[in-house]
Image: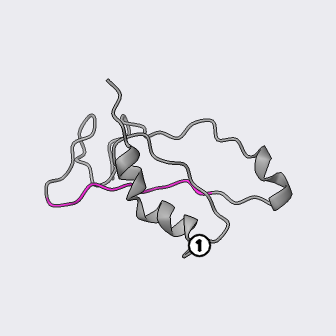
Amino acid sequence: SEREWGELNEKDELRRALKEQRCLVGFETLPCHFPPTFKVERKKGIVYQKKRSPSYTDRILWKSAHSLRENVQPLAYEPVPAFSTS
């Protein structure tokens, strides 16, 4: 079954800061509909390190000219579990 990440995304500091224009004004990012990718063990799959709080890193942000904004269409935004480093 697919997990719901809505509550976690609501508390996402980067997305809130972008929305409130507290940083990187004009940049956008997508919500993360996948588990946090930091700080994971170097093992297959996603196993979190016990001494660290899981979080999202290596985010993709973009900014386009106002007249071209509608032309930016993200195709995919997901982790690569086979790449096990953090």
The location of residue 54, given as percent across then percent down, is: 27, 54
Give the residue drawn at x 40%, y 45%. Answer: 6
Q: In this rendering, would 72 be left or right of 76?
A: right
Please, is residue 21 above or below residue 44 in the view? below
Q: Quadrant of residue 33?
A: top left
Tell me where residue 10 sits by quadrant. Answer: bottom left
Q: Nearer the viewer, residue 23 or 41?
A: 23
* Residue at the top extreme of this rendering: 1
Residue range corresponding to the magenta coloring: 51-61
What residue type is disc 1 on? Gln
Q: Residue at x 64, y 41 (%)?
A: 74
Magenta stretch containing residue 55, yes or no?
yes
For mark 1, give the secondary structure: loop
Q: Position of residue 55 (x, y in %)?
A: 33, 56
Question: In which quadrant will I find the N terminus?
Answer: top left
**Where 12 falls versus 79 (above or below)?**
below
* Left or right of 41 on screen, residue 72: right
- Report the predominant secondary structure element of the magenta stretch: loop
What is the crowding at mark 1: few (fewer than 14 residues within 10 Å), some, or many (at least 20)?
A: few
**Front-lying residue, 82 or 74:** 74
> Dot 1 corresponds to which residue?
21
Residue 30 in magenta stretch:
no
